[in-house]
């Protein structure tokens, strides 16, 4: 596989070219962060719930193999067929084989980041199977042949006018439509037809309960349920980390998930699937795809706690001002920037640096992943593995050389201050000086503090 | 080795030291009435709760809220409304003309206005999703405060293989964060508290 | 009380007045202030860029300078936090551990150690407080907007001791300014945009001055304010608490 380098600063620079649109993107996501704040602050036990959710997840990771076996055993008892996939390719083949067996020509699919990551749609389309994403946001970006830009709000980067244009082009609506109500109604009618004609339904999994051998799926639109209950075959794809030990643990997770994601007290639909309906089939595919490896990385395994609420994206001041696509990974934003380097360190080496380490992500995380600390730790690995641009690395070595030699530091400081003071403006503010593009440099003082101190010391 | 064995063996090698499961805490219920809270939250999530008064019947409420709907079905016994006989339908696809489904909910959750609907009380799992409008009938004494109590109460083994918490009508905010009620499922949802 | 003054490198070189103010303020409050002469930098710029290992001798130089002091005070949450947290990568000698335990950010020192109740300071202006992230979410100097916790602040009560000051409310009370160390040049576009949004929040809400506990954030915001031609000015918390403008 070709590993192209994701240049986050460059993508972010492009995004910022449209000042007004960046303002709009930032404010739209901040609005969700505010709704999240309101919802979490109305719950006195919020911080306790976060502690509990994190502790349950830690327990899951430390017993993951046993829980997976327990889950499989109980799922089979429930009449569910369980499959295991080592990687994306495995997963896609399993899905394809199930569809072949049932001669499925069209599959409806609700939101699943895992299948995005596996590029399942492209794979099935190459085999002549039509895939219809049924989450409204996902359908919008699918029609326009774009990846989602957010894991909860896939089309958050698009304005209603853009959606109107996409629907005009692909669904034949009249040009210039931009009323969200009318656009949603159009999608409803279009997707109803798809639900009624789907030969199979694929869903993601929010939680897989070891104790009961069933899965829970959370949606607001009801698209997962409508697809599954009408199709003869249900396929649910889950990462190995979706396991929770007991049904009662859903009490914790359903309380933190949606409050974190959108500020709602719970999703409109929280569905518990414990077996197919009469005459239908249910399959669960348990996928590894790099997760067991991440489990072995002590500093980073906690990233597997993630329940995909998207709160870290909404709060991230960098994400809000660079957009989901600038990350070039299925899961963008802070959580994506600690997951992706484990998948391809070189390709995603700019992502752990796409942060000021402000720490807001770690504080909103409902399962208490130390996201900003992990970003810092990935930086150390990227530098050590030589994935950092050579010049920057040498610069850091030079800095240490200077800073560990007090007299050299003082000499250079003096030269620097003097030079800054006399350099003509065009030499300070040119294309090589990233500082000066939007900012003035500080006015250099005549003397350093140390010089002042020595002069004034009694 | 099969994929299953490979995955399990990698996990076994890589998993961290044992970490205990926390004991679940019980959280105090704030000083609010379950019914009032349920009503407030349901309004917040786009639905409406109506408490049945002495001068009303379930039928009269439904006729008042949905005067123009004809294709109605229900699992609530003894309802004096013209209804579609679901036992004559064999394929869920044939439910697509249902305009109003009336379902008696198992119980409700006051903190988030969700009602628990196990599939053993439904003729079809698709019914609450395919219908254009949704009415739940909920006995007030079947309200619990939060989701911890809800999971204690529900019996997943008795649910018929499927069960769902429904909190308000189907909705989406996928276009510019504008809330639109009625994404794929019900366009409106009321809960009649009896 | 004997206190060693820790002056971060960019304050030493670009904002000596901040160090002077810190020194004067601590002296006024009865501290006997020492300035170890061979200090340079804490090593944070290298470490945050992924070169923690390359910053070890810089860190050891700092430790050597501050060994033997019970209180080390610096006017920067960011640098103090770096010493406290990331010096875990240095050999954990007695000296290193002691420096990590004894280092304080200025407002924290004034609030927790000196527990000052009054100040002779005057600053008759409208001031917006920028909560630097390392002080805020790193050192928990005040209640964080993300967490469900009761209100507290180690900075606001200090500012309220200043006569004449009027603190303004911000729309976003603790959002990052976008400085972020080398982030400010490596992610220039986002960094500048974050800073612009911060200064606009202060301007919109009527600030004449923006204050913070970190000169790095202020240097970034000052650069943007000057480019914009704004009359809003920056002032470090130490300068503000030490001011006597009537």
Image (spheres, coloured by chain):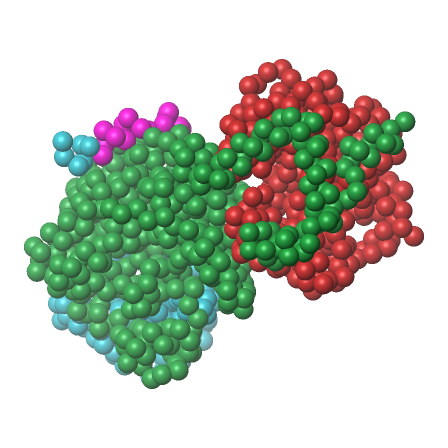
Instruction: Tell me where residue B52 appears, x and y as whole percent.
Output: 43, 69
Q: Quadrant of the C terminus of chain B?
A: bottom left
Point 46% across, 61% down: residue: A14
The front one of B37 and B23 is B23
- The correct choice, above or below, for C134 with respect to A280 in the image is above
Q: Quadrant of residue B20?
A: top left
Q: Which chain, by letter, is green?
A: A
Q: Which chain, by letter, is cyan?
A: B
Magenta segment includes B21: yes
Point 15% across, 49% down: residue: A93
The front one of B166 and A3 is A3
Q: Colour of chain C?
A: red
Q: Does residue A17 appear left or right of residue B63 in this picture? A: right
Magenta segment includes C61: no
Residue A433 visible? The answer is: yes
The front one of A426 and B47 is A426
Point 28% across, 31% down: residue: B11
Instruction: Tell me where residue A58 appears, x and y as whole percent.
Output: 40, 33
Residue bounds of the magenta highlight:
B7-22
């Amino acid at each position: 596989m070709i590993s192209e380098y994701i240049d986050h600063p460059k993508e972010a620079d492009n995004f910022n070219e449209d000042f007004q649109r960046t303002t709009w993107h930032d404010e739209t996501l901040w609005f969700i962060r505010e709704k999240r704040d309101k919802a979490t602050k109305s719950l006195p036990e919020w911080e306790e719930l976060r502690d509990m959710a994190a502790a349950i997840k830690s327990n899951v990771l430390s017993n993951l193999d046993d829980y997976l076996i327990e889950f499989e055993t109980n799922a089979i008892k429930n009449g569910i067929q369980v499959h295991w996939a080592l990687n994306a390719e495995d997963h896609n083949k399993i899905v394809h084989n199930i569809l072949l067996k049932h001669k499925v020509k069209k599959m409806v699919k609700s939101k699943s980041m895992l299948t995005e990551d596996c590029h399942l749609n492209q794979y099935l389309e190459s085999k002549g199977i039509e895939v219809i994403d049924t989450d409204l946001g996902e359908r919008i970006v699918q029609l326009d042949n774009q990846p989602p830009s957010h894991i909860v709000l896939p089309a958050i980067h698009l304005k209603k006018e853009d959606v109107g244009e996409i629907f005009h082009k692909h669904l034949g609506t009249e040009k210039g439509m931009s009323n969200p109500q009318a656009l949603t109604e159009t999608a409803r009618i279009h997707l109803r037809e798809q639900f009624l004609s789907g030969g199979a339904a694929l869903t993601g999994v929010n939680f897989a309960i070891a104790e009961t051998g069933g899965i829970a799926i959370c949606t607001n639109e009801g698209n997962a349920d409508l697809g599954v209950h009408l199709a003869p075959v249900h396929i649910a794809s889950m990462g190995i980390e979706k396991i929770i030990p007991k049904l009662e643990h859903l009490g914790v997770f359903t309380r933190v998930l949606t409050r974190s994601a959108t500020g709602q007290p719970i999703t409109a639909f929280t569905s518990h699937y414990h077996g197919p309906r009469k005459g239908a089939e249910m399959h669960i595919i348990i996928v590894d795809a790099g997760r067991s490896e991440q489990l072995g990385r002590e500093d980073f395994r906690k990233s597997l706690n993630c329940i995909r609420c998207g709160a870290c994206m909404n709060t991230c001041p960098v994400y809000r001002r660079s957009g989901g696509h600038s990350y070039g990974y299925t899961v963008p934003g802070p959580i994506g920037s600690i997951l992706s380097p484990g998948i391809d360190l070189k390709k995603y080496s700019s992502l752990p640096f796409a942060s000021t380490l402000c720490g807001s992500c770690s504080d909103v995380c409902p399962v208490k992943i130390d996201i900003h600390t992990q970003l810092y730790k990935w930086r150390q690995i990227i530098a050590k593995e030589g994935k950092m641009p050579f010049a920057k690395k040498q610069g850091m070595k030079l800095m240490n050389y200077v800073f560990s030699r007090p007299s050299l530091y003082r000499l250079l400081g003096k030269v620097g201050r003097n030079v800054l003071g006399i350099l003509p403006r065009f030499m300070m503010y040119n294309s090589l000086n990233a500082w000066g593009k939007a900012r003035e440099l500080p006015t250099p003082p005549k003397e350093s503090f140390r010089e002042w101190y020595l002069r004034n010391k009694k | 080795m099969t994929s299953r064995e490979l995955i399990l063996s990698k996990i076994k090698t890589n998993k961290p030291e044992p970490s205990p499961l926390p004991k679940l805490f019980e959280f105090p219920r704030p000083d609010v009435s379950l019914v009032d809270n349920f009503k407030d939250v349901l309004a917040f999530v786009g639905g409406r709760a109506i408490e049945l008064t002495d001068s009303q019947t379930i039928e009269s409420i439904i006729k008042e809220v949905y005067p123009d709907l004809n294709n109605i079905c229900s699992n609530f016994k003894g309802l004096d409304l013209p209804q579609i006989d679901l036992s004559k339908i064999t394929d869920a696809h044939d439910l697509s003309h249902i305009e109003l489904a009336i379902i008696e909910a198992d119980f409700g959750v006051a903190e988030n206005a969700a009602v628990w609907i196990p599939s053993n009380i439904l003729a079809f799992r698709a019914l609450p999703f395919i219908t254009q409008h949704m009415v739940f009938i909920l006995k007030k004494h079947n309200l619990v405060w939060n989701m911890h109590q809800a999971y204690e109460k529900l019996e997943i083994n008795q649910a018929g293989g499927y069960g769902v918490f429904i909190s308000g009508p189907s909705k989406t905010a996928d276009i510019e964060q504008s809330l639109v009620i009625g994404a794929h499922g019900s366009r409106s949802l009321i809960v009649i508290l009896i | 009380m004997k206190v060693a003054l820790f002056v971060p490198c960019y304050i030493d070189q670009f904002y000596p007045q901040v160090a002077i103010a810190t020194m004067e303020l601590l002296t006024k409050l009865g501290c006997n202030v020492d300035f170890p002469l061979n200090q340079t930098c804490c090593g944070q710029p290298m470490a945050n860029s992924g070169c923690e290992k390359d910053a070890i001798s810089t860190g050891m130089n700092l430790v050597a300078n501050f060994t033997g002091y019970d209180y080390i005070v610096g006017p920067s949450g960011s640098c103090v936090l770096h010493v406290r947290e990331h010096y875990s990568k240095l050999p954990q000698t007695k000296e290193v551990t002691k420096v990590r335990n004894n280092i304080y950010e200025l407002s924290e020192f004034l609030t927790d150690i000196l527990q000052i109740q009054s100040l002779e300071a005057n600053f008759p202006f409208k001031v917006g407080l920028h909560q630097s992230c390392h002080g805020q979410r790193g050192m928990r100097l005040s209640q964080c907007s993300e967490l469900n916790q009761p209100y507290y602040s180690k900075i606001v009560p200090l500012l309220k001791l200043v006569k004449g000051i009027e603190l303004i409310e911000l729309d976003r009370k603790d959002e990052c300014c976008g400085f972020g160390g080398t982030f400010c040049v490596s992610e220039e576009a986002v960094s500048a945009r974050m800073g612009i949004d911060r200064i606009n929040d202060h301007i919109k809400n009527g600030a004449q001055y923006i204050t913070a506990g970190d000169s790095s954030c202020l240097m970034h915001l000052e650069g943007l304010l000057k480019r914009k031609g704004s009359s809003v000015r920056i002032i470090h918390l130490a300068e503000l608490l030490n001011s006597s403008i009537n």
